[in-house]
Image (tube, helix red, strand yellow):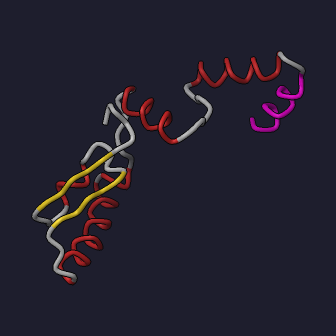
């Protein structure tokens, strides 16, 4: 499909327009920047992704919790906290999370 997209893009004016319409119809909106990506993802009912849920979230929290305990850390400030699901796995006294997405 990527080869076809590249060929269509080569058509003056119409090529980029066609690719844009295709991506919008299929939900493949072009990446512009992190802020817009995450805002759109959460607005559409998306979440913070696999790293914040289930086995991957548990694995990540084991590493963070070990570091917190070994270094006697009592508070965490997280930039990029997303929907906050990861927090339920953390063992810390105080937590503040910030995210670029207003919807999150």
Let me know if residue 84 is in the magenta part: no
* Picture layout, residue 90 above or below residue 24: below
* Picture layout, residue 94 above or below residue 14: below
The quarter in which the C terminus is drawn is: top left
x, y percentage for residue 7?
A: 87, 31
Q: Which residue is pictured at 59% across the width and 24% down the height? A: 26
| Relative depth, front residue between 91 and 54 | 91
Spot the residue most to the bottom.
Answer: 70
Let me know if residue 8 is in the magenta part: yes
Query: Predominant secondary structure in magenta?
Result: helix
x, y percentage for residue 60?
A: 32, 66
x, y percentage for residue 2?
A: 76, 38
Occupied quadrant, residue 19:
top right
**Magenta segment:** 1-11
Occupied quadrant, residue 39:
top left
The quarter in which the N terminus is drawn is: top right
Task: Say left or right for 95 vs 64.
Answer: left
Q: Which residue is pictured at 22% across the width and 63% down the height? A: 76
Occupied quadrant, residue 21:
top right
* Numbered-mark total: 0
Spot the residue most to the left.
Answer: 93
Task: Say left or right for 83 vs 30.
Answer: left
| Relative depth, front residue between 51 and 35 | 35
x, y percentage for residue 68?
A: 21, 75
| Relative depth, front residue between 73 and 70 | 73
Q: Which residue is pictured at 34% across the width and 40% down the height? A: 47
Q: Which residue is pictured at 58% across the width and 28% down the height? A: 29
């Amino acid at each position: 499909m990527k080869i076809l997209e590249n060929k269509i893009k080569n058509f003056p004016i119409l090529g980029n327009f066609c690719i844009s319409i295709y991506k919008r119809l299929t939900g493949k909106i072009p990446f512009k920047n992190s802020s817009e990506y995450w805002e759109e993802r959460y607005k559409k009912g998306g979440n913070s992704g696999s790293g914040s849920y289930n086995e991957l979230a548990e694995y990540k929290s084991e590493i963070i919790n070990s570091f917190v305990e070994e270094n006697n850390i009592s508070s965490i400030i997280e930039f990029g906290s997303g929907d906050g699901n990861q927090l339920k796995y953390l063992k810390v006294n105080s937590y503040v999370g910030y995210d670029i997405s207003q919807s999150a």
